[in-house]
Amino acid sequence: MNGWTDGVRQALDQPGFRSTGVAEGGEGSFAWVLVDPERHPLVVWGRARLRSYAATARGLEAAAFTNGPYVGRLGRAAVAMRLGACVAAGASGALFLTRGSERRQALSWGLGALAGLGLGWWLALTGWEPCGLVHSETAGIDDRRDWRGEGATHGWIGRGGEGFDSYAVGLGNPPAGLREAMGGLIPLIVDGEALGADPADPNYHPDYARSLTKKQHVAWGLLPTPGAPGPGALLVVATRDRAASAELASHLTALGVTGAVATDSSGCAMLGSGRRFILGPPRLHRQTIQQYGLCCHGT
C-alpha cells in the first residue's frame, strides 16, 4: 500500500463518510473521491444547451463528476486545416470586398479572420460522436452512435439497479438492459485483474498499453468493502503525471478494486466534486468536442 490508498481505506471507517457518503483525499500526483453508491448512484450526464461543458458539470453539484468517453470525428491535423482554411478564407474575402483606406482594410481583414475562425470552430469542433454506446434512464439519453464501430475495442461501466452489486465493468460496448451505461472508455481492470501492456500478455489490451503513457487520467473503480457498512464503494481517482498514470491500475488492484475504467485522458481529463474542480476543466476546444460525462448524484 501507499499513502493515497491508505487514505481511501481509512476514509471508509470515518464518521464523515458514513454520514455523507462522500470523502476526498490524495497524495502527490493522485487525488481521489470516494462515494457510497447507495446514496449517490452513478449517472450519465450530457452537456446542457447554451452552456459550456464545464459549466454543465459544475451545475450538477454532484458528489463526483468527470468527463466521459473517447470521441471521434477529425484528427488534429484535419482540425487545424479546417480552422486555418476558414480563417484565411474569411480574411481574404473581407479584404477583397473592402475598398478605402489601409486602416479600413486592416479592420475588415481582422473581422473577416474572426468570422472565419468562428465558422472553422463550428465546422471542426462540433458534431463529434462517442466511441461507444451511451445510455441513461435518469437523463433520458440513448445515444447509439458509435464512431467507426470503436466501442467494441474499448471498455464500459454501468449499473442495472441501485445497489453496488448491480454495478459492472467490462470490455466492448455495454450490454442491453442497464439503467446507466457508458462505453468508449479505457479498460484498466476487469474481473479483478489489471490488463496487460505487453502484446505477449494474455490480458493485453491496446487501450491499456496506451494509457500508461498518458499524462492525466481519471478512473472509476468498483471497490468491494467487506466489513464496512455497505457492500461496496465507487472510487474515482485522478492522476496528474505519466508516472502516476502508469502506476494507477496496479495501485487500484492492490487496493481491492475489481473493475476499473478511465475516461478520455490527458487534455480531456476532468474530476470535480460539488461545484469545485479537482482536475481540469479541459481547455475550451476540448470542451467543445465533449458531450457526455459520469457523475454521482445524491438521493
Image (cartoon, rainbow, N blue to C red):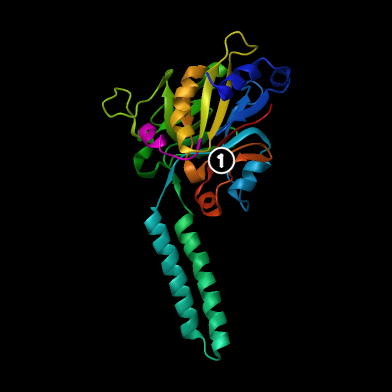
Magenta segment: does it hold 208?
yes
Tell me: residue 47, above or below residue 210: below
Q: Where is residue 148 in the image (x, y as percent from the top left)?
A: 35, 44
Secondary element at tag 1: loop
Q: Position of residue 183 (x, y in %)?
A: 45, 34
Rendered residue at 48%/28% (across/down): 157
Magenta segment: does it hold 46?
no
Give 277 or 36, whichever is nearer the viewer: 277
Location of residue 11 by image quarter: top right
Q: Start and end of the magenta stretch?
A: 207-217
Q: Where is residue 208 in the image (x, y as percent from the top left)?
A: 38, 32
Tell me: residue 48, above or below residue 205: below
Tell me: residue 259, above or below residue 105: above
Rendered residue at 52%/90% (across/down): 99
Residue 233 is left or right of residue 261, and the answer is right
Instruction: Report the residue marked by disc 1.
Output: 270
